[in-house]
């Protein structure tokens, strides 16, 4: 016990006080039984674990010799730590729980004699350090493209181009010399194409986020998808000199997102243990799914883990027009059910997955008792076309069957608002967890606003979908 936590306590009849400095990540907890007795516990950041709390609560039980319903508890820590320990605290039914959010170092004075805990901010000089720049390495055999990208990155103070490589044979030495945070990588180059370079050197040896640079031709679609399957985070279209002003914000956002992405994401497949788990889906259902950065791989993992027979499924993936067809064809080759790029008027039916075409919006319509998709060029929503919110919000106005909605990895907030509207009508909703998301933007927003009923690692989502198609929930009026 003493090896894991620092435990100091004094009862009122003994007098005394406990003074400690609480640094960010640490936590101080006090337990009170009326004004007669109290006990304080100080935990360092490394000791904030389930095992520590089990031992603390065992000590509390022994000390007060009463159940938790007669005790008040106060916890002082950073908001993130308070969120972490909430699950430990909420397992026990305390009389009252008070959480005190302190984001900086503070002195905590524990006064058992008064039954009080006092907190004082430590006066410290503010240390201002220069923000760390994102180091970008540009790999492209075209001097023009290298110069265009360098010019684009020079417009944002957060970036610095640390190296530029013309040939794949120069890349490894430059990586070791400059240690870039992110690499932009051309596909077609002499000596070796960019996808091969990614698969043989960059991904297995250095784990550096990579954004592929492509001319976005139909012929390059399979190569870009191959790159995404082997470690690339995203892709951008090769810019022309005349396009710099219009494409700069998009390129900066994509490269910045890649630099900050979760390259250590884990598959984390843990079979869900539920008595009602079934191996087949209820086919009288509808599955709708939205994703962005990192989504093509997440979608592949889910589709290939689904049962052979599935309900109708609609997918919005933020993807350029020429890639959505290649992506759908690749998924169709991997799955026992049909996967196709949606066309206007396609019927929504069992064992069919429809992927919204890049550059178009997709929604459901009903005609003569059947359900179809409408593909149109309505305005972008949240800057996106196709947009997850567009599809979700349209469905929320016209629910026709039992529905399961999913939001996967991606930057921004697209889909969260629409998922909340669906959940408010009884739709079962799932968001991918942070640990397995390449970019925890869209799922994070859905979780934050209460749109996600379940938060699951990627490896659990296919099974969770299967479960939920068999657990109908009454739609509220």
Image: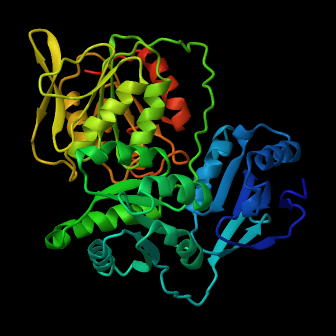
Q: Judge by depth and name the residue closer to the eye, 60 or 393.
A: 393
Q: Judge by depth and name the residue closer to the eye, 97 or 189.
A: 189
Q: Residue furthest front?
A: 191
Image vertical order of residue 361 relative to residue 438, above or below: above
Image vertical order of residue 17 relative to residue 452, above or below: below
Q: Residue furthest bottom?
A: 125
Question: What color scheme is it?
Answer: rainbow
Would you say 301 lies left or right of 190 here?
A: right
Residue pictured at 29% horizontal, 26% vertical = 425
Residue pictured at 88% horizontal, 43% vertical = 62
Residue pictured at 61% horizontal, 59% vertical = 205
Which of the 4 image quarters holds residue 40?
A: bottom right
Would you say 64 lies left or right of 324 here?
A: right
Image vertical order of residue 74 relative to residue 363, above or below: below
- Residue 450 x/y as whole percent: 40, 41
Is residue 12 visible to the viewer in this orientation of the structure?
A: no
Which of the 4 image quarters holds residue 341?
A: top left
Would you say 272 lies left or right of 143 here?
A: right
Would you say 394 lies left or right of 443 here?
A: left
Residue pictured at 58% horizontal, 40% vertical = 267
- Residue 328 x/y as whole percent: 31, 32
Image vertical order of residue 348 relative to residue 197, above or below: above
- Residue 163 x/y as whole percent: 45, 78
- Residue 133 x/y as whole percent: 46, 79
Is residue 222 visible to the viewer in this orientation of the structure?
A: yes
């Amino acid at each position: 016990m003493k090896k894991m936590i620092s435990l100091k306590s004094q009862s009122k009849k003994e007098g005394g006080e406990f003074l400690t400095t609480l640094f960010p990540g640490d936590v101080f907890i006090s337990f009170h039984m009326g004004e007669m007795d109290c006990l304080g516990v100080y935990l360092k950041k490394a000791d904030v674990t389930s095992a520590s709390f089990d031992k603390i609560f065992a000590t509390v039980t022994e000390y007060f010799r009463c159940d938790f319903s007669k005790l008040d508890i106060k916890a002082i820590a950073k908001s993130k730590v308070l969120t972490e320990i909430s699950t430990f605290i909420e397992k026990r039914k305390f009389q009252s729980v008070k959480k005190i959010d302190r984001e900086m170092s503070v002195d905590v004075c524990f006064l058992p004699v008064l039954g009080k805990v006092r907190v004082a901010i430590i006066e410290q000089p503010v240390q201002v350090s220069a923000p760390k720049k994102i180091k970008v390495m540009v790999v492209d055999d075209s001097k023009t493209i290298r110069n265009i990208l360098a010019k684009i990155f020079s417009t944002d103070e957060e970036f610095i181009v640390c190296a530029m490589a013309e040939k794949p044979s120069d890349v490894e030495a430059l990586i070791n010399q400059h240690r870039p945070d992110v690499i932009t990588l051309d596909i077609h180059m002499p000596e070796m194409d960019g996808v091969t370079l990614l698969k043989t050197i960059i991904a297995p040896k250095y784990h550096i986020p990579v954004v592929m640079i492509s001319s976005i031709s139909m012929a390059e679609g399979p190569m870009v998808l191959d790159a995404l399957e082997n470690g690339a985070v995203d892709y951008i279209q090769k810019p022309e000199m005349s396009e710099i002003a219009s494409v700069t914000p998009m390129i900066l956002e994509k490269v910045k997102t890649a630099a900050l992405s979760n390259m250590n994401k884990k598959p984390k497949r843990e079979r869900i243990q539920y008595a009602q788990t079934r191996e087949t889906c209820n086919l009288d259902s509808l599955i709708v799914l939205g994703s962005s950065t990192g989504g093509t791989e997440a979608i592949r993992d889910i589709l290939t883990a689904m049962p052979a027979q599935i309900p109708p499924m609609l997918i919005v993936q933020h993807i350029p027009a020429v890639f959505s067809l290649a992506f759908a064809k690749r998924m169709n080759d991997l799955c026992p059910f049909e996967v196709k790029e949606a066309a206007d008027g396609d019927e929504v039916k069992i064992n069919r997955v429809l992927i919204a075409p890049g550059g178009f919006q997709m929604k459901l319509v009903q005609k003569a008792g059947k359900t179809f998709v409408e593909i149109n060029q309505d305005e972008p929503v949240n800057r996106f076309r196709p947009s997850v919110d567009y599809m979700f919000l349209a469905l929320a106005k016209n629910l026709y069957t039992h529905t399961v909605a999913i939001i996967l990895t991606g930057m921004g907030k697209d889909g969260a608002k629409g998922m909340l509207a669906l959940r408010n009508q009884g739709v079962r909703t799932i968001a991918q967890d942070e640990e397995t998301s390449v970019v925890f933007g869209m799922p994070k927003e859905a979780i934050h606003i209460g749109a996600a009923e379940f938060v699951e690692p990627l490896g659990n989502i296919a099974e969770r979908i299967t479960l939920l198609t068999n657990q109908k929930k009454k739609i509220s009026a």
